[in-house]
Image (spheres, rainbow, N blue to C red):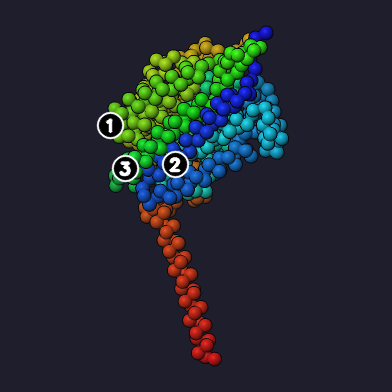
Amino acid sequence: MNSLQPTLDIATIGFAWAAFLLSLFMLPGIAMVVVGNVRQKQQGAALSIQITLVGWAIFCSFFIGWWLRQLFVPGPGITGGFGDVSRALPWSVAMGSASDGAGFAWLRFVLASWMVSALVAASLLERIRTTSVLFLTLVASAVYAPIVGAWTSDAEGWLVRLAGSHDAFGGAAIHALAGGFALGVLHRLGPRASATTAEGHIVEVPASIPWLQALGCFLFIIGLFAFMGSFLQPLASGDSGADVVVIGAYGTSTSLSLMTTNLILALSAGLLIGSVLGRGRPHKVLAGGVAGIVSIASGSDFYHPLQSFLIAGAMTWFAFSVRSHLATRYKIDDALGTVSWHGAAGVGGVIVAGFVLWAFPSTAGADPAMINPFGNTVAALFAFLVFGYVPGYLVARFLDYLEVLRIPLSVEIAGADLMDDLADAQATADAAERERSLVRRGLAGQSES
């Protein structure tokens, strides 16, 4: 008898927890990139939003996103009705005990939701209200990202079963969707005042703390490595359990060393292209590394390392071209580069994976789904356009109609931190004046008596 059984021994649990804990490097990484990128008088407000998004992503994932992801796996109505959400509802016993190891899947989902929220928010720096950020990220990470993930990153998803889609590590459900949603919001939000010339052209705002921005990008890369590794699960093969097989998100066997080698080669290609196109600026070099990793997220469980290197190099060049084109022609001011480093690289990587891995088995079993270009192209378009750009633009337009989308121009120019300081100073002055008034009135009462 040859079978694969879950190994819940110390080594397996340790691997899962190690991958999860290392993934947390992404949290301070993005925060440092954001603080290093914005002007000094906006740093406090930008950092506050990123910290708030950590708690917001956990809340939205637990109460909305997780059960919604299970609900939409069959389509619904395409490969079946609505999915079974009994174990994913917030009040379910399974959400408390997670005795079958499902807790790690939820933790990974929370990180994916936070990543979508953080990437979208970081592209809108210095000009958007905090309440609008929270509403936009709720829609992106807790409504649309779970649906795309259910359809493209689940072995039972209808796009996987019927169309042959393959997105092993969230290239569509995380990066392409975040890039598309950010582009939709930016289209309506408009550029920063500090990034706009008198003639209406978009210029790059110099980083306020370049070394902090570069260090944050480096930490984000470490966390992204670990996050992708958390999708892998060691299983014992055979009755003795002596042999260990590593399977990916779709149940197919892969190799931890293969995935790691692919990621390292993709990082190498991204850094080299970033060094050339970024003119040696550290944060641009590291951003190229991020784009390289994102570009192979869909197929790095099957790629040969040489394929990863070539794909990452081409997609990093494509991401740089998209960033320049959006700024010069469409006046899109993407503060962090979410649309290019994540959106463009993610979309291109998903589509390329469909061609490179054509006819590879996407799922395990006797009747596996076969990867093909059509399925991956549909997945990329769904993630970037249908569930990314369109809802991002419509929600931003609705918030703009309510006049709650953008902060006032005076606050943007003066800086949110400075305005907070002025408000605190004014409140202190008002309190002191009230105290002096009470003292004067008390003295006046005594003189009359």
Outermost residue to the top: 1
Q: Position of residue 353 (x, y in %)?
A: 47, 18
Q: Is residue 211 above or below residue 249?
A: below
Q: Nearer the viewer, mark 1 or mark 2?
A: 2
Q: Position of residue 153 (x, y in %)?
A: 56, 24
Outermost residue to the left: 279
Residue ID for mark 2 = 31
Q: Residues under labels 3 and 1: Cα distance?
A: 14 Å
Which secondary structure lies at badge 1?
Answer: loop
Q: Is residue 398 left or right of residue 274?
A: right
Q: Earlier in the sequence, mark 3 or mark 1?
A: 3
Q: Residue at x 46, y 71 (%)?
A: 432
Q: Quadrant of residue 272?
A: top left
Q: Earlier in the sequence, mark 1 or mark 2?
A: 2
Q: Residue at x 64, y 20 (%)?
A: 6
Q: Residues within 10 Å of mark 3 (few under 14, many from 20)?
A: few
Tell me, for residue 279, which label it has, or none. 1
Q: Quadrant of residue 263?
A: top left
Q: Residues within 10 Å of mark 2 (few under 14, many from 20)?
A: many
Q: Position of residue 289 (x, y in %)?
A: 38, 28
Camera-side residue: 406 or 153? 153
Q: Residues under labels 2 and 3: Cα distance?
A: 17 Å
